[in-house]
Image (cartoon, helix red, strand yellow):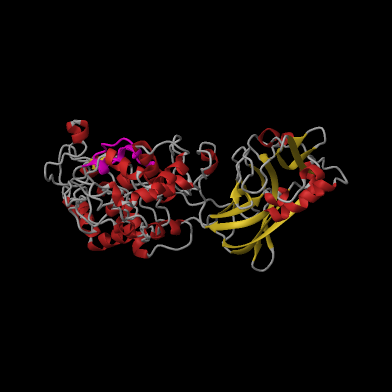
Amino acid sequence: MKLSFSCPSLRLPLLAGLLGFGLGAPVAFAAGGTVRLVVEPTFAGERLSLDRPLVRQGLPGVTVSRLDLLMSGLALKKVDGTWLESADWFALISVGKGLLQADADGVTAEKFTAIRFNVGLPADVDHGDPNRWEPGHALHPAQNGLHWGWLGGYVFTALEGHCGDDGYSYHLAGAGCLRQVELPVDFQGGGPVTIRVGLDVSQWLGDLDMVAAGLSTHSREGDALANRLADRTVSAFSVNGVATDVFHSLAPALAEAVPAGTTPFALQVTERFPKPVLPKDNPLTEEGVALGRRLFEDVRLSRVQTQSCASCHQEAHGFADAQAVAIGAEGQMGRRNAMPLVNLAWRSGFFWDGRAATLREQVLMPVQDAHEMNASLDLLVSRLRDDQTYRAQFKSAFGGGDISPDMIAKALEQYLLTLVAQDSKFDRALRKLTKLSPSEARGLQLFVTEHDPVRGLRGADCFHCHGGMLFTDDGFHNNGLSMKSGDTGRMGVTGNPADLGKFKTPSLRNIALAAPYMHDGRFATLEEVVDHYSSGVQRSETLDPNLAKHPAAGLQLTADEKADLVAFLKTLTDEPLTATREVTFAQP
């Protein structure tokens, strides 16, 4: 639920406001920001899993089956010591329902040094009419299941589970159990901010003799156990981290499906991106992602043990390589350029011609390709089975079973799905952490503007194929390249003459690192690419309509316009993602 501070509410900038509406208008970044609290429940430092015995924490007979809280009164502490207080902020945190975050909009552009909130509700709200709240609101009784109708109030904290053969039910309610939590945290308002807040259940249960203290609370006046547990609420919260963005909530949905004994991988995807569709039969886990990365970097995946997946997909080159066409493990010359591997959760139809329908299908094809790694799957499985550490990793990641091609593909799929490019200079400008230079801003304007001389619009018209926050439409297009080497592109897969010369639209994220360009690596620089679209497009029957509509002479961009466009394209580099990391498993 999003609720506003008392200052004017301001929305996060949307790409629609930048790229596509009011074409030709000046580009501007919206002001204001959102603060999102993301609650991360744990027990003694480990992720809390409902209904699982807390064996590793020394409580083998104890489980937690429910943890729900009602929060109110969010406030942010300014540098001068005063507080920016929300007008009507309420939040329901429910581990079982996967409700682990709450937003507040309209945060002013200034520094803050602490956050404050109540666990519980003020008396007028607690004893007010519960039926006034809209469906979906944190205080709607059907949403939270925490309203004690016959007592005229809410349960503020519901902590339930089992202690051996007995159950326990700790319900904290009423003015005596209302507690205020204040946490120090430094952040800049005015843009999107996510504050990760830890909630440690061991602060309630860790040293509590539950049988002696009692297995239930009644939150009536004089209930010493309820007051004792309420006091412990304050120390249960801590700040785990701060990020200058807001992210989709993905972990709760995955947590229910992960193999026993594994830990869900906390994939962070900005809400400026569409919500990704992740494989339900292969949920991301810490163990699976680590295994996938090891496989990705291991040269044993090639027949002669000289080349790994990472050999052709290097961070420093935007997870591509610096070759015009890929070169195989035994020096074989490939046909096409190695495609960058980022933001694959939103892709379909893999490779330049789309011959692989899914990522899981794609990952094993280079291993078997005679022009690339040239290994059989039987050979690969045999090598991995001979490695004791691999056997242990596969068992840890997938809960048992023999190593198989399907397991290998799933592990690689998990790792590759974590390669999300979302933190470039362009993204930071959207979040008001930096500004585009005048040249970069002019390049962005060219990028998103139609070229339509009849209507007085002069632009580079890039956004039709490279629009949206992913900077690709994920389609196949003939972009006016002259035919070379008889490569028919998508037509080679579909057999449809209408697909002649069509190739996959690559994302432009990290494009400045991914030279050379096009499916055959024919252009060495971004400047050459811009020249092609300005005046080098070759006309044919299958030329994309958004290029064929331009004048026969092309866009005829000026030298300054070309420079501005290249300057903008360079702002799409995600430095954190593409920083070179140590390759640990490169040797056989």
- Magenta stretch, main secondary structure class: loop
Left or right side of 454 for 222? right
When asked about the image quadrant of residue 352, the answer is top left
Q: Nearer the viewer, residue 477 or 236?
A: 236
Residue at point 44% right, 45% down? 392
Say if the magenta span includes residue 537.
Answer: no
Left or right: where 274 falls relative to 351:
right
Q: Residue at x 82, y 32 (%)?
A: 150
Q: Report x, y in % for residue 148.
A: 78, 35
> Which region is colored magenta?
346-369
Classify 269 as above or below 182. Answer: above
Q: Residue sitting at 33 percent across and 45 percent down?
A: 472
Q: Position of residue 325 (x, y in %)?
A: 19, 51
Residue 479 occupies quadrant: top left
Q: Count of labels shown?
A: 0
The answer, for residue 218, to whether it is visible in the render is yes
